[in-house]
Image (spheres, rainbow, N blue to C red):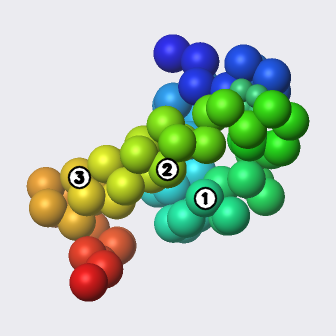
Amino acid sequence: MYVCLCKGITDNQIKDAVYGGASNLRAVRKQLGVTTQCGKCGIYTQQLIAETLNAATVGGQESQFYAAG
Ligand code: FES
């Protein structure tokens, strides 16, 4: 599913970026260019990053992330 229509970035690309070590919006933006035009995708991108990190922390057997806070 497309998350960022301006840049044509999908949820899977964002998840892959997070699994690759981009653990916040700034890192994902730098890597993929998400939110760099209209910015409407920012909220969902942040939510997707959090969900991906949470899934990796809670359910992943090979977790490389830690829950913040
Ligand atoms: S939808 Fe992502 S910058 Fe516009």
Give the number of the disc on residue 36. none
Q: State the residue position of label 1.
A: 25
Q: Residue furthest right?
A: 37
Q: Residue furthest bottom?
A: 69
Along the line of sight, the residue nearer the viewer: 6 or 39: 39
Residue type, numbered disc 1: Leu
Secondary structure of residue under mark 2: helix
**Ligand 1 rendered quadrant:** top right
Residue type, numbered disc 3: Ala
Q: State the residue position of label 2.
A: 46
Is 67 displayed left or right of 12 in the figure? left
Give me the C-alpha separation between circle 3 and circle 1. 17 Å
Q: State the residue position of label 3.
A: 55
Along the line of sight, the residue nearer the viewer: 60 or 52: 52
Is 5 displayed left or right of 61 in the figure? right
Task: Give the mark nearest the N terminus, 3 or 1.
Answer: 1
Callout 3 crowding tier (Cα within 10 Å): few <14, some 14–19, many ≥20? few
Callout 2 crowding tier (Cα within 10 Å): few <14, some 14–19, many ≥20? some
Where residue 41 appears, x then y in whole percent? 62, 33
Where residue 35 appears, x then y in whole percent? 74, 42
Give me the C-alpha separation between circle 2 and circle 3. 14 Å
Q: Are marks 2 and 1 in contact (CB under 8 Å)?
A: yes
Q: Quadrant of residue 60?
A: bottom left
Q: Quadrant of residue 2?
A: top right
Task: Give the mark nearest the N terminus, 2 or 1.
Answer: 1
Residue plotted at (55% across, 65% down) = 24
Is 33 displayed left or right of 59 in the figure? right
